[in-house]
Amino acid sequence: MGYFGGWPPYVSAAERREKAEEAAAKAKKSGATLTSIAPFRGAIAKTFWGKAWCDNLERYSDYASRLPRGRTYVRNGSVIDLQITPGEVRAQVMGSSLYTVTASVTQVPEKQWKTICADCSGSIASLVELLQGKLSNAVMERICKPGSGLFPSPKEISFECSCPDWAGMCKHVAAVLYGIGARLDQQPDIIFSLRRVDAKDLVQQAQAGLQPSSKRVAPAKVLDDALLADVFGLEMADVPKPVTKANAAPQKAPLAAKTAVAKKAATRKVAATETRVKKPSPAMSKTASVAVKRPRGRPAKEKKPV
């Protein structure tokens, strides 16, 4: 990247932005698809993993003098294209001219990746979220851990730029590396692609560590059907309640005992009926005694036939 013909003329940020917009429009007209870093103010990254990437860059003491200019370039929209593929980053940065930047990142060592997977398996709170591509903060903290995470060290990354600057890291390369930090805010999974590892390994490690729960749900935590109907507006079907000591029906007497009781009741009823029939009432007894009473000494007269 050496340059012996003198430095190109200085180009202001406003002029660079205008030239970047023209280059992007020209590329779009020709059918090219660019993924640029839009101009912004303030912090380059807002998520802790995006910030962690930028912090990792600033540990590169060899490139400290180039990093501030790179932050300026990425904020004013000079990075008009940023493509991240497994192990490689390709970008176009507008300076005094349009420059091409290429960065290569080595694959993370297998032993280091296995250690990361083992450490993350105990931090995955929801396997469903991980399968949906939602990485928990605990997992991302482990992935972003300096030295033993997925962020490359200076010896694991190499880059080149088409600009005339002779430095190992020019301001255009610095802008691209900061652009990766900004892109991580929206796409944290690109770090896996960049280090050429498969995020599914985290899922497999989590599945291996999962144990089926033998705990029963406490009755107090189970919603009643009526409450479910009120909450969700549903008509719940009548479901028979489980039998407990409180609502258990009294046990029925055996059939033989029931039959014996019925026979005794029938016998008592018949006996009471016979007693009432045999015992005459007082009125009937008096009528009978009057009918048989005759005067003494006089025979009864016989009625002559008419």
Image: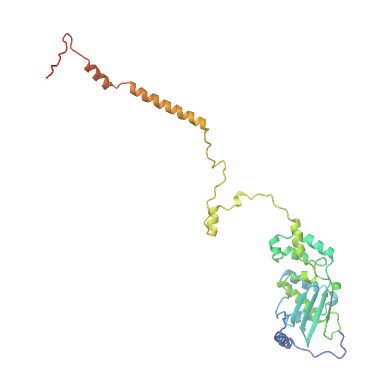
Q: Nearer the viewer, residue 273 or 7?
A: 273
Q: Residue at x 74, y 58 (%)?
A: 207
Q: Is residue 51 above or below residue 262?
A: below
Q: If the image is split into quadrants, where does the N terminus sit?
A: bottom right
Q: Where's residue 255, x and y in %? A: 51, 32
Q: Is residue 21 left or right of residue 247?
A: right
Identify the residue at the far top of this view.
297
Q: Residue at x 80, y 81 (%)?
A: 101
Total numbered circles: 0
**In the rendered image, which quarter is residue 65 located in?**
bottom right
Q: If the image is split into quadrants, where does the C terminus sit?
A: top left
- Applied colour scheme: rainbow
Identify the residue at the far left of this view.
306
Q: Residue at x 22, y 17 (%)?
A: 291
Q: Where's residue 189, x and y in %? A: 74, 69
Q: Is residue 243 left or right of residue 51?
A: left
Q: Where's residue 57, x and y in %? A: 80, 74
Q: Where's residue 7, x and y in %? A: 83, 89
Q: Is residue 12 above or below residue 183?
A: below
**In the rendered image, which quarter is residue 294 located in?**
top left
Q: Nearer the viewer, residue 111 or 59?
A: 111
Q: Is residue 82 above or below residue 250?
A: below
